[in-house]
Amino acid sequence: MNATVTIKKCSMNKIVYAPPVANGSYTVCFFTANLKGQAAAFPDNIQKCGTTAFFKVSSYHLPKSLLNKMSFNLEGHWEKDTNAKSQDGHIFIAEKASESLPETTSEIIKFFEKNCKGVGKVMATEIANAFGAKTLDICAHQPKKLEAIPKMTPVLLGNINSACLSALVRADVQALLKDSNVEVSVIDKIVEEYSDEATTILRCEPYKTVSLLGFSTADKIAMSLGEDADSVRRMHAATVEAQKRACARTGNMCAEQDAIKAQLQVLTPEVSSDVMDKAIVEVAQTYDIVKQGKYYYDKSDFLTERKMAAKIAELACVKPSKEAEIEKAFIEWQQENSMILSPRQAEAVRNLKYRISIVTGGPGTGKTTCLRAIMDVYHKVWPSEHILLMAPTGLAAKRMAESTKTNSATIHKACCLVPADNNSGFVAQSECRICGFVGIDEMSMVGEHLFAFAIDAVLNSPSTRIVLLGDTDQLAPVSRGDVLRDLIQCSVIKTVRLDVNYRQGSTSTITDASIKIRENRAYSGMTRNLKFDDEFNFISVTNPDQKTEADQILSRVVEEYQKGVAKYGVKGTIILTPTHFDKGTATGYLCKNRVNAVIQSVVNPKTDTKPFLEVNHQTFMVGDRIIQRRNTDQVINGDLGTIISINKVDNETRVEIIFDSKEDVLVYDSNDVKDIELAYAVTIHSSQGSEFPCCIIPVSSSYGPMLTKPVYYIGITRAKKKLILIGDEEALKRAVRTTRTQGRKSLLGPRILKKVQAK
């Protein structure tokens, strides 16, 4: 039964959340429909009660937010339902879904009951009887007539007017876009955003919806409405989108013309090369894109970078001050602490005479010791001034607070940032002004947009001192830009590089490996300079077949993980992977998600008697290691913990978790559980700022672009007592020889230098 059929005026009865499939998540629902006039659209054995048919629907096109409020017309085909108890069961695969407006009195009454808060059956009946078939139109466009209805209040009138107007606008938009084949959820977004202006915007300014729907969907709509492939406004929107994509895929703040054109060829393949070149030039003249030499900036990014460069140059140009007081305070600090800092550490402290300075160095080189000294000396010189420590992530802020014994916050919290739909992803909720001492750790993880908020909030006063700390050999920021590297390379800001490792003894093979990898001395030609022993062990696993090799590596990872837990405990043993998710490839087979699933199946297998909870395609059980993925008032993104109980209370599943950093048990409901993931393995990127007694790291050529020196350098430097690499040594050799690119495209450094030279 694969013939296409249409079923009209279907109503949702119950939603069932189906498991994931290859192309994403679909929705399974139980629907009802009147058989009158459309009995032929249903299989003979479909469940019936009088003239009502009960049937199951599966679709990618049903918006969960509207299912219980709308009546639908569905277009699709019937298939055998493999999950049905009866072998004769059928399921309707809906390929299209459109809203069906109420027409009859009973349909109108049902519409009001579902969509209008506070309107019951009695009032809905009175409204339907009063206005008949024109009910929705009158309620939407002549709402004052509703005042004649008994017990009508301004609040109820507003609810009714809003619901009816939205339904009619959705119907108009739906009719306008009948040939675009967009999903109902897209139509709902358009209606919610533009209300009664929706159809006008779609007809006259379809590319205005790009910010709401994304370019691809907006372009699909525009083309269905007759937009010419090479129209000026289409090419304008496509060029702006191409510039964004060219930057997003590389982490650059700006892009060259060839990179933009390459993205245009993806977005508008039917357009000639000359038209693309012309569009890039013309858009740059409109100020939606700003051309700087050979580079093209998004207007917002251009303004952000220019403003930030001006502020940094302003701070860097202030003459040194309080030199004598700082030196005196530093001598006192060394005497009080019976500590003599290294010459470079001492230089970093003396750089307090500058408004802004940088301290860089690898793990264990004394950055934290240096920071504590700087803070103490600052307090001696400016005893009444405030000290604020910041970091880009909650986990990094927590580590900073623990190591300095001083309160620390994320940059987002310190600058009052909240999520927003813009280039930075954030907006300042309120005006934030920071004065005194500001220390920002893990600067290698800070992109331009985030640093722009931080530097903008700092007041340039006589007592202002900004100290930036980080390691340029670590991974580049997830967001765009590479601020720390740009600031160092512009040579305007006083920078101290610490290069002596104090963390472990000189005989540590882990320390030896990290230093050699950092200094590009791990391999000399075919000669291995790394020392493998009980502390730093390499287990060789090679196979010409990547999938087979991945199987073998994973098997040894499981074995070594169990040994690690036996010696260092479950909290002290971690698996670090370069990649996060599974794409069904050999790479995916060794990703964090896959490793977690395999480890869980071995060390904490699912049983019929053990309580469990399935959320976001993961199964959680008592005893599982987990990681928090969102900052809350109680825990921060990156916190590790263990599930200690899973119980059902009043039909709600409650999960009790004890985090490693806390003594109290936290209770999560099924909504909160969406914010955690299994954490027998975590990504190397997530591990930045953390340390573990025992680290196990897979090494495989299948990791592709993630097989780089920064990735494995970070992973190796997370281990305190035991480091085990498992895989192909040729892949390791390739990784440690693949250095990070020489920065990301940005003019931040040159802008700062130019402004300083002009002062």
Image (cartoon, grey):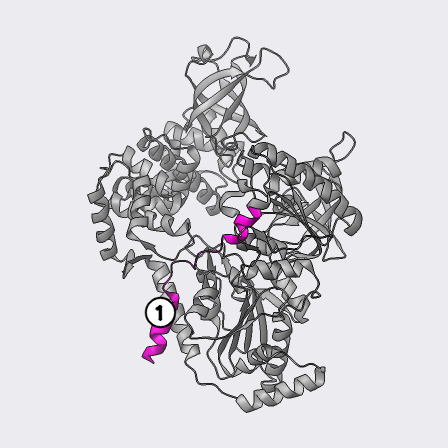
Which residue occupies the extreme top position in the image?
44
Q: Would you say residue 286 sits in the magenta stretch? A: no
Relative side of 206 to 182, left or right: left
Residue at image coords 71%, 66%: 505
Percent x, y of residue 462? 49, 84
Residue sitting nearer the eye, 500 or 384 = 500
Q: In the rendered structure, which segment of residues is drawn in magenta?
A: 731-759
Residue pointed to by mark 1: 751
Percent x, y of residue 173? 34, 35
Name the residue type under label 1. Answer: Arg
Percent x, y of residue 135? 39, 32
Residue sitting nearer the eye, 726 or 54 = 726
Within 10 Å of disc 1 (Cα), the crowding (few <14, some 14-19, many 20+) is: many
State whether the magenta stretch is mostly helix, strand or loop: helix
Relative side of 148 to 617, left or right: left
Q: In this view, does 682 lie above or below 21?
A: below
Q: In which quarter of the image is residue 304?
A: bottom left
Residue sitting nearer the eye, 588 or 547 = 547
Percent x, y of residue 526? 55, 50
Relative side of 198 to 654, left or right: left
Q: In this view, does 159 lie above or below 757?
A: above
Q: Quadrant of residue 436?
A: bottom right
